[in-house]
Amino acid sequence: MNRGSLIIYDNDGKIWCYIADAEGVASPHDIPNGIPYILTEYGEQDNKIVKSVDVSTTPHKIITEDIITKPSYEELETRLLEAEGVI
């Protein structure tokens, strides 16, 4: 079973609790009563940093930033070989 993230935030959009995705044997989230929260789908926040929540929109939207990933050594090597016409 895959479970998405739970983001609990205040009225200013500041995140107070972020419980990330889980896979395998993961119990469902305990949903807070009377506290704003957002449930996301599994994988929706992949390669993202959750910064805050925009509370001026309806529904409230998560503000994220992409995680910058660098290519691996193998990817760089493959690109170089392709550029040289070896492969």
Image (tube, rainbow, N blue to C red):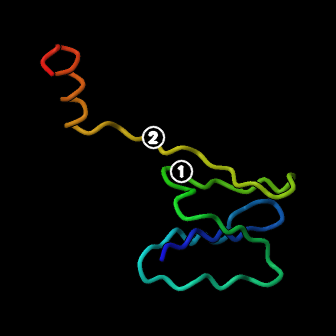
Q: Residue at x 12, y 18 (%)?
A: 86
Based on the displayed image, in which of its 4 quarters is residue 8 positioned?
Answer: bottom right
Based on the displayed image, in which of its 4 quarters is residue 74 positioned?
Answer: top left
Horizontal arrangement in the rendering, residue 45 relative to residue 12 (left or right):
left
Q: CA distance from mark 2 to mark 1?
A: 9 Å
Q: Circle 2: is it few (<14), some (14-19), or many (20+) Cα within 10 Å?
A: few
Q: Circle 1: is it few (<14), some (14-19), or many (20+) Cα within 10 Å?
A: few
Which residue does the numbered mark 1 point to in the structure image? Answer: 48
SS at circle 1 = strand
Horizontal arrangement in the rendering, residue 12 relative to residue 49 (left or right):
right
Residue type at mark 1: give it: Lys
* Contact flag, marks 2 and 1 (Cβ < 8 Å): no
Q: Is residue 30 above or below residue 62?
A: below
The percent coordinates of residue 6 (x first, y second) are 63, 71
Horizontal arrangement in the rendering, residue 84 relative to residue 20 (left or right):
left
Which residue does the numbered mark 2 point to in the structure image? Answer: 68
Residue type at mark 2: give it: Ile
